[in-house]
Amino acid sequence: MPEGIKDKVAIIGMGCTRFGERWDKSGDDLMVDAFKECIEDAGIEKKDIDVAYWGAFYPMQGLSGMPLSTLLHLPFIGVTHVENMCASGTEAIRGATYAVASGASDIALAIGVEKLKDVGYGGLPAFGVSMSGANLTAPGGFAMLATRYFATYNLSPEEGKRMIGRVSVKSHHNGTLNPKAHLRREVTLDDVVKAPIIAWPLGLYDCCGVSDGSAAAIVVRAEEAKKFRSDPVYIKALQIAISSGEEIQYTDFDMAHVESTTHAAARAYKEAGIKNAREEISMAEVHDCFSITETVTMEDLQFSPRGHAREDIESGFFDLDGGLPVQPDGGLKCFGHPIGASGIRMIYEMYKQLQGKADARQIKDPKYGLTHNLGGVPHANVCSIAIVGL
């Protein structure tokens, strides 16, 4: 039986650029900025790194390991380019973590980037991928998740729309507290409900935007971590689950949840020793590409019982001052979503929160932080979950 990586690897340094419409920076500039912050935070030099993994989904940033190696002038070490849709950032973390946990590496770099605003698309660039035979836009696929969820749990269109609208209001509030976030403006529930529709019931404020940005991490073996800093953050679990295609092929999939998230979460909790996620997880950054995605993820992660996320959303349980804060940095919705960087950005927030360095959005005495990084559409996707703690 695999024994997992719990407490075998620690994060000793992280960096993250401001996300947004970064017309002032190239993708290379953004990676350099994240890298510099990261190694300064870790207290190491570039020559100390012995392996690197970098995540980028779209080819505009380059393929193979050479774009990163030549950019940072890494000293003839192994550099691997990884891609796993929107979970590419966590995939880079996974490569670096496994390299260190296996003993093959002492100090590993994970970095992710995406520079999309310059390509001129209003949304994500089109690339002609057909998943399980269904050609879908991202808003269209997740809109179907929303309508099916509403129908499954007997929510009227008005009730459902206001439920997911409340998710966006919360994320916008948290984003105002974060100087690195892309969108930093409060919105009201009426703003969200009355916004132009993108794919019903998803309106403008239910959809994350397209952002530029980069994030990076340095990982070492756990027993070495305190040689570098007094407050490292330890990886408690890192699990991935990828759809086999069965969701779309059979009729027992209700299209009101994301099956890969349930499997990745169950394995992550087992690896980390979490018995009751709702009570033991202190905070979470989840893949809120759309407000409905966050809603169903609360149930897939066992934070809310099936069909009852609405009660927790409307009671403020997931608010910054609630029982289990979700998206303390604003999430994809407001911090932004440069594809290859998002998974690392999520861990960056957990890292800062656990160290007590999250400023105005700081959560009181967190113990465990969870990140959920999802790529694809509801019935064909990759899900990666990380749990970190002190």
Image (cartoon, helix red, strand yellow):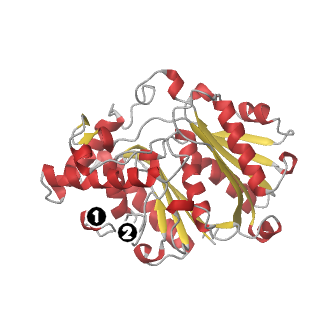
| Viewer-side residue, 92 vs 182 | 182
Amino acid type indicated by mark 1: Ala
Answer with left or right where residue 274 lies relative to residue 34. Answer: left
Q: Is residue 256 visible?
A: no
Which residue sits at x=78%, y=36%? Answer: 72
Q: Which type of secondary structure does the marked residue at label 1 adopt?
A: helix
- 2 or 1: tag closer to the N-terminus: 2
Which residue sits at x=52%, y=66%? Answer: 268
Q: Is residue 274 above or below residue 138?
A: below
Q: Is residue 161 above or below residue 67?
A: below
Tag 1 residue: 309
Please count the marks in the image: 2
Q: Position of residue 370 (x, y in %)?
A: 51, 63
Q: Quadrant of residue 131?
A: top left
Answer with left or right where residue 278 lies relative to residue 51. Answer: left
Local crowd at mark 1 within 10 Å, few (<14), some, or many (≥20)?
Answer: many
Quadrant housing the C terminus: bottom right
Q: Which type of secondary structure does the marked residue at label 2 adopt?
A: loop
Q: Position of residue 375 (x, y in %)?
A: 45, 44
Tag 2 residue: 303
Amino acid type indicated by mark 2: Phe
The answer to the question of whether label 2 and label 1 lie on touching residues, with beta carbons closer than 8 A, is yes
Answer with left or right where residue 275 lies relative to residue 252. Answer: right
